[in-house]
Structures are given as C-alpha cells and as structure tokens.
Image (cartoon, grey):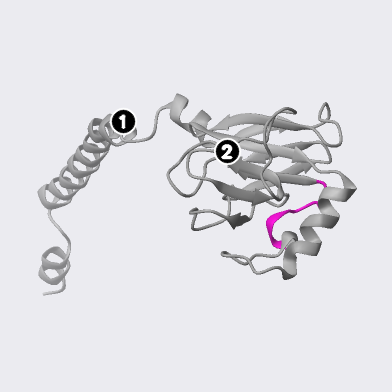
Amino acid sequence: MSETATTADAPEEGESRRDFLLIATSAVGAVGTALAIWPLIDSLNPAADVLALGSTEVDLAPVKVGQSITIKWRGSPVFIRRRTADEIEAARKDDGADLPDPEADADRVQKAEWLIMVGVCTHLGCIPLGQKRGDSKGEFGGWFCPCHGSHYDTSGRIRKGPAPTNLLIPPYVFLTDTTIKIG
C-alpha cells in the first residue's frame, strides 16, 4: 500500500515534460509577440526633429542691457529683453495700474532684468513691434501691435487695445546665469 500511494502521488514523467513544454512555448510566444509589436509602438513616438523643437537653449551672455533678441521656439517668436533699471522700475510701478489682465511684474519674470515671453499678440496672433531700436514701442514703452492697436508695457502686459490677455510667458529655466532653456 505504501508503494501504490507513493507512485500515485508522484507525477508521471510525461506530465512534467508537458508542463515544461507549455511554459517554454508560452514564454517564447510572449517574447516573440513583444518583439513583433515593439516597432509599431516605437513608431508612435515623436520624431527627433519634433523633439528638438520642444525645447531650446539660449546663451544670454551677448545680450547687453536694454537690448532685445528674438528666437524661434515651437514655430513662434520668443522675445528676450534684458531690461534696464528704468524699465524694471516702470514695470513694478505699473503693478498697481488698472490692467485688463492684472499680473504683477514679479510673477512674469524669474530674474528682474530678463523678460522672456512669446512674441505673439493675444488678440489675433500678430507679431508686435518693439524688438528693434526704431520700432514703435506704444504708449507704455513696451510693445505695440499695429494691426489692431494693442499696447503692451515693459512687462509685456496689455494696457490698451483689443488684446484680451498679456503676452504669454513660456516655460523656462535658468541653467546658468547666462543660459536659459525654454520648453
């Protein structure tokens, strides 16, 4: 009786082999399926040229006080202005003015001397004047959109005209004192 009980409890050689073959076949099938599907999944990732447009680094060292530069980020112009002490003071003084889209100057900049904003009028998508020396800077010394008459101050806030909001501030970080990463 003890011999029969031991042989009945022990699995047959065919069953253990069958279990091994089932597990091995399933594992190989799962790996094969993953390898076959991977190119499809990888093709859904954005292309390298699209990823490159997602962020850009800018060296601010050559920009002098009072100078503006324009760079391109995600197909839009970005205005970078190294503001003078007078421009910073005017922007801070205007914090208390009656603004259509109230926003403090300190909330729009990370470092007071650097104003970084998307250079697209929030009314109909025009590009405001004010980046070049001879451009009209509007009534408030910042930027002026001649298409419909929107006037922005030295902090890029809408002060007069049909634009509903301030010029947008893109996401950016200072990597060093003179280098920023936008996006």
Q: From mark 2 to mark 1, how far is it between C-alphas?
A: 39 Å
Residue 2 image point, x, y percent: 16, 73
**The magenta segment:** 107-113
Magenta stretch: helix, strand or loop mostly:
loop
Query: Of residues 166 and 7, which is closer to you in this image?
Result: 166
Rate crowding at label 1 as few (under 14), some (14 to 19) or many (20 or more) other CA atoms within 10 Å. Answer: few
Q: Quadrant of the N terminus?
A: bottom left
Does dot 1 land on a helix, a strand or a loop?
Answer: helix
Amino acid found under the numbered disc labelled 1: Ser
Residue 159 vertical placement versus 115 (above, below)? below
Instruction: Name the residue that disc number 1 marks.
Output: 43
112 falls in the magenta region:
yes
Dividing the picture into quadrants, the one containing residue 133 is: top right
Q: Nearer the viewer, mark 2 or mark 1?
A: 2
Instruction: Name the residue that disc number 2 marks.
Output: 128
Residue 11 vertical placement versus 69 (above, below)? below
- Specify the farthest residue to the bottom: 1
Dividing the picture into quadrants, the one containing residue 60 is: top right
Query: Of residues 24 and 38, which is closer to you in this image?
Result: 38
Amino acid found under the numbered disc labelled 2: Pro
